[in-house]
Image: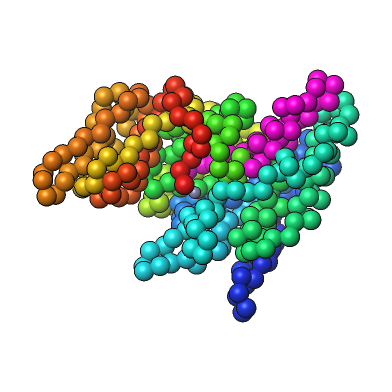
């Protein structure tokens, strides 16, 4: 295991932060059968369950490396957001948005397809050679970036560590949630085993959720480059990426973090990135559904939120999910599901202001368009 430190742009005189990455196995570059796996945790800094999973994963990867069991290069960034990690206001940990700018740390990553420029005009007939050309273009494009802010330098540092990976796993957590993951339709067949090992209760698919999040910065780049190509100049997909929500923010426990770290190791074994036989695939707990099919619930009025369903519950259309009780008039408003699905996440609030988002249930039919992710 090698430890690497990337200094971030200093935001103010006398202040400097750095991004630490751990590198396992041999570098994959130049060997056609070798993979590079990139795993990061807690890009929204206050995502401690993901961080603990990364700690336990690092221990396992170090042991596997010592046994000579790694058949790939694995890069692990347990603290993907040292900037957000230091943001505390009035006793609250605020990791999702940069306090100074209000920007979400996991939105608006650089458009890598644009960064690759006109590389497609030089493509030949070999899909693998074209893939290598794209990676070269991305390498030089990223190296030429001049970030203006610490925020931009953090996003650039993460992309620089990950752009040439074959597999990107971005570990987050939600507010109060069941284990669930996001990926693209194209990558789902490859991540389906990971959903099984993790025991994911929802797998949400979208090609473009509209936010240019970290996982989609990678997957959309290759998808966008592939779309206009004629058959004569094929492009092999360079990267598959997924965002995993390691349950809710308070679900920090050795047992479940170990379970999640072990699941990732089994997935990497099944892919041949770690030597040895993978454990038999557990059943998929719930079929994948379109992210556009998830129903979002908003409080139509303000009041006390009383939950009528538990996280992970299987929901039928018509089932009550939330009561909102007006403490002055005693009027109770009940919100019901319009879809059959899994109640996979909800906000960690017990009092709602009017219009506040409350939670989501999966659905098999697309019902939403536009930006599919929350702010
Ligand atoms: Zn997150």
Q: Nearer the viewer, residue 154 or 76?
A: 154
Q: Which residues are magenta?
A: 217-245
The location of residue 206, given as percent across then percent down, is: 55, 31
The location of residue 287, given as percent across then percent down, is: 46, 24
Residue 113 left/right relative to 267:
right
The location of residue 137, given as percent across then percent down, is: 81, 44
Q: Which residue: 32% across, 32% down?
A: 313
Q: Where, quadrant-wise, is the N terminus in this rendering?
A: bottom right
Residue 71 left/right relative to 270:
right
Residue 2 shows up from this direction: yes
Residue 241 belongs to magenta span: yes
Q: Nearer the viewer, residue 313 or 90?
A: 90
Residue 246 shows up from this direction: no
Q: Which residue: 16% across, 39% down?
A: 332
Q: Determine whether 153 is above or below 199 in the image.
A: below
Q: Nearer the viewer, residue 253 or 168?
A: 168
Q: Which residue: 52% across, 53% down?
A: 104
Count the marks: how many?
A: 0
The location of residue 273, given as percent across then percent down, is: 68, 39
Name the image quarter holding residue 217.
top right
Colouring style: rainbow
Q: Which residue: 56% across, 59% down?
A: 81
């Amino acid at each position: 295991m090698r430890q690497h430190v990337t200094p971030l742009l200093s935001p103010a005189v006398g202040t400097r932060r750095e991004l630490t990455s751990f590198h396992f196995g041999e570098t994959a570059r130049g060997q056609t059968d070798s993979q590079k796996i990139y795993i990061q945790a807690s890009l929204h800094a206050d995502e401690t369950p993901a961080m603990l999973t990364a700690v336990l994963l690092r221990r396992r990867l170090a042991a596997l490396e010592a046994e000579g069991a790694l058949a790939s290069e694995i890069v692990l960034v347990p603290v993907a957001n040292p900037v957000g990690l230091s943001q505390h206001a009035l006793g609250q940990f605020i990791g999702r948005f940069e306090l100074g700018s209000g920007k979400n740390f996991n939105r608006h990553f650089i458009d890598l397809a644009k960064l690759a420029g006109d590389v497609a005009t030089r493509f030949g007939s070999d899909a693998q050679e074209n893939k290598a050309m794209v990676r070269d273009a991305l390498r030089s494009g990223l190296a030429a970036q001049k970030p203006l802010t610490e925020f931009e330098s953090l996003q650039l540092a993460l992309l620089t560590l990950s752009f040439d990976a074959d597999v990107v796993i971005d570990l987050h957590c939600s507010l109060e949630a069941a284990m669930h993951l996001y990926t693209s339709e194209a990558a789902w067949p490859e991540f389906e085993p990971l959903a099984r090992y993790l025991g994911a209760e929802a797998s949400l698919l979208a090609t473009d959720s509209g936010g240019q999040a970290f996982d989609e910065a990678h997957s959309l780049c290759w998808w966008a480059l592939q779309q206009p190509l004629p058959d004569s100049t094929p492009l092999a997909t360079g990267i598959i990426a997924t965002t995993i929500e390691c349950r809710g923010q308070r679900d920090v426990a050795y047992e479940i973090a170990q379970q999640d770290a072990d699941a990732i190791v089994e997935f990497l074994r099944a892919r041949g990135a770690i030597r040895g036989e993978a454990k038999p695939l557990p059943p998929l707990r719930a079929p994948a559904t379109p992210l556009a099919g998830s129903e979002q619930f908003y409080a139509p009025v303000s009041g006390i939120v009383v939950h009528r369903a538990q996280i992970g519950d299987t929901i039928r259309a018509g089932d009550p999910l939330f009561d909102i009780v007006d403490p002055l008039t005693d009027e109770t408003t009940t919100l019901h599901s319009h879809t059959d699905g899994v109640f996979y996440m909800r906000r960690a609030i017990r009092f709602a202001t009017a219009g506040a988002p409350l939670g989501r249930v999966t659905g098999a039919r697309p019902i939403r368009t536009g930006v599919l992710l929350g702010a």
